Amino acid sequence: MSSNTQRKTVLITGCSSGIGESLAREFQNRDYNVIATARRLESISHLREAGMTTLSLDVTKPESVKAVEMEVGRITEGKLDVLVNNAGILTRGALADVSPEHIYSIFNTNVFGIMAVVSALLPLLIAAKGTIVNISSASSVTPFPFKGPYAMTKAALNSYGRTLAIELSPFDVHVLTCPTGYIQSKLEANGTDQVPEKSLYKAMAGKMELGLPDTQMEGTEYAKLVVNEVQKGRGWGFGPWRF
Ligand code: NDP
């Protein structure tokens, strides 16, 4: 990483594609030192070539989280300005059928993984009076059939983020939790398990609660909104869409 100590440093999880990659590029455009992480280092070699520091991080593996904690402490000299918890997975299933193992598995990435990374990097964030960004989902507040397990993880993330914001306020660490709308990415295509028949969706259409504004946008556009919110330095809350 370039050793310009005036510049702020951001670490982003899940940069191999989609929103994570867009956020990495947007933070770099705004002159941050970017630590881009991904499960497979080769998947972010293009970000390293673009001048970012790249590290391997699987948020579900304690040894991987520990290694990143050590390495980030070393390269940032003990201060991290922004942590973006972006890594996440989508699995589908009817709530009446999903197994406890299915629920545990998605919580392991989307909630427990985030909690582990936050706990590991918190001393560095406190030292910088930094900001934690959680990429949540509109589905956390708007039910959608067969995405119940995913929605449950994101609802838990909202609750985690709001409580964390209060608990970390004495340390001047900000927490921003973003209930993201639809962004084109490989998330849906990679979604696994029990994909329902299209006709079932049709039959349920009238029952869905579409309470959110149309938030469909490109990842690059969304990344700009998130970085704007980080730079406003808000203490807590939901953004870019507030409820
Ligand atoms: P992508 O599938 O493109 O990105 C997901 C990223 O998470 C990938 O880089 C993936 O890495 C990474 N990842 C998955 N599991 C782990 C893990 N155990 N450890 C580290 N990284 C992991 O989807 P999006 O860009 O759309 O999703 C990014 C975030 O945005 C997610 O949290 C998602 O829930 C959220 N979101 C997305 C919406 C959308 O419409 N796209 C809407 C609302 C929220 P790998 O390449 O290794 O699989």
Image (cartoon, rainbow, N blue to C red):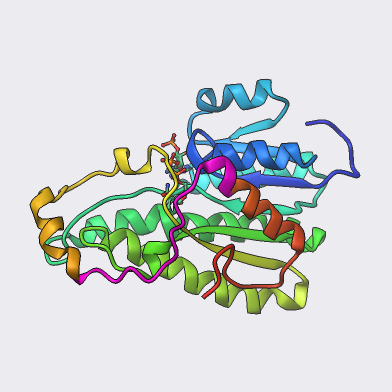
- Residue at position x 51%, y 42% from top? 218
Q: Front-most of 159 and 234? A: 234
Residue 228 as seen in the image, left or right of residue 221: right
Q: Front-most of 56 and 208? A: 208
Numbered range of the magenta stretch: 207-222
- Residue at position x 70%, y 31% from top? 52
In the rendered image, residue 209 lying in the magenta stretch gets the answer yes
- Residue at position x 75%, y 78% from top? 170
Q: How many marks?
A: 0
Q: Main secondary structure of the magenta part?
A: loop
In the rendered image, residue 212 lying in the magenta stretch gets the answer yes
Q: Could you tell me residue 42's position as x and y percent?
A: 52, 22
Q: Is residue 102 above or below residue 237?
A: above
Q: Could you tell me residue 109's position as x and y percent?
A: 41, 52
Ligand 1's quadrant is top left
Q: Could you tell me residue 148's position as x and y percent?
A: 26, 63
Res. 96 image quadrant? bottom left
Q: Could you tell me residue 69's position as x and y percent?
A: 65, 47
User: The N terminus is located in which quarter?
Assistant: top right
Residue 7 as seen in the image, left or right of residue 230: right
Residue 95 as seen in the image, left or right of residue 199: right
Res. 141 image quadrant? bottom left
Q: Is residue 124 above or below residue 75?
A: below
Res. 228 image quadrant? bottom right
- Residue at position x 18%, y 68% from top? 206
